[in-house]
Amino acid sequence: MADGGGEAPERRVGLTESAARRVAFLKQQENVPNAFLRLAVSGGGCSGFQYGFSFDDKRGEDDIVFARDGVELVVDAVSLELLQGAEIDFVEDMMGAAFQVKNPNAASSCGCGNSFSVG
């Protein structure tokens, strides 16, 4: 997969310590010890693409697994193309609590933080 020169983006997605703790808490609360967090990108949202988080317990052939502190994050190969080098964080502030995607591939994102566009 040549990218036309230059350094290729890192083919990984990271979880912060805060995100890993939250996933572990949610797995325990939902009583799904064998589940993992799935992150997928789909077309739509107000900026062109949107992030989708879900718990899942089945892996596809094209899934890539990233782990931190015993928690697994699974991303399919197509979504990974748009998420390379991204970091998933869990943030609690006055506006509420949510997972946030810090995506270096996003040229812009909407105010809600759930959708983005690429350049």
Image: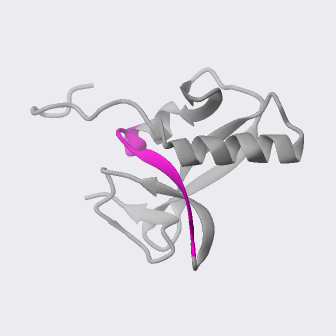
Q: Nearer the viewer, residue 46 or 104?
A: 104
Vertical comparison of 88 with 117: above or below: above
Q: Nearer the viewer, residue 87 or 3?
A: 87
Q: Nearer the viewer, residue 41 or 13?
A: 13
Magenta residue span: 81-93
Name which residue lies at 58% across and 79% down: 95
**Left or right for 1, reference 22:** left
The mark tally for this picture is: 0
Name which residue lies at 75% across and 28% down: 58
Please say whether residue 89 is one of the residues in the magenta stretch.
Answer: yes
Quadrant position of the N terminus in the picture: top left
Please say whether residue 4 is one of the residues in the magenta stretch.
Answer: no
In percent of width and height, residue 5 lies at: 10, 32
In percent of width and height, residue 41 lies at: 52, 50
Quadrant position of the C terminus in the picture: bottom left
In percent of width and height, residue 107 lies at: 28, 61
Vertical comparison of 86 with 112: above or below: above
Q: Nearer the viewer, residue 72 or 24?
A: 24
Name which residue lies at 64% across and 43% down: 21
Q: Kindly indicate the quadrant of the structure image that contains residue 3.
A: top left
Q: Residue furthest right?
A: 31
In percent of width and height, residue 43 lies at: 51, 58
**Left or right for 1, reference 99:** left
Vertical comparison of 5 with 19: above or below: above
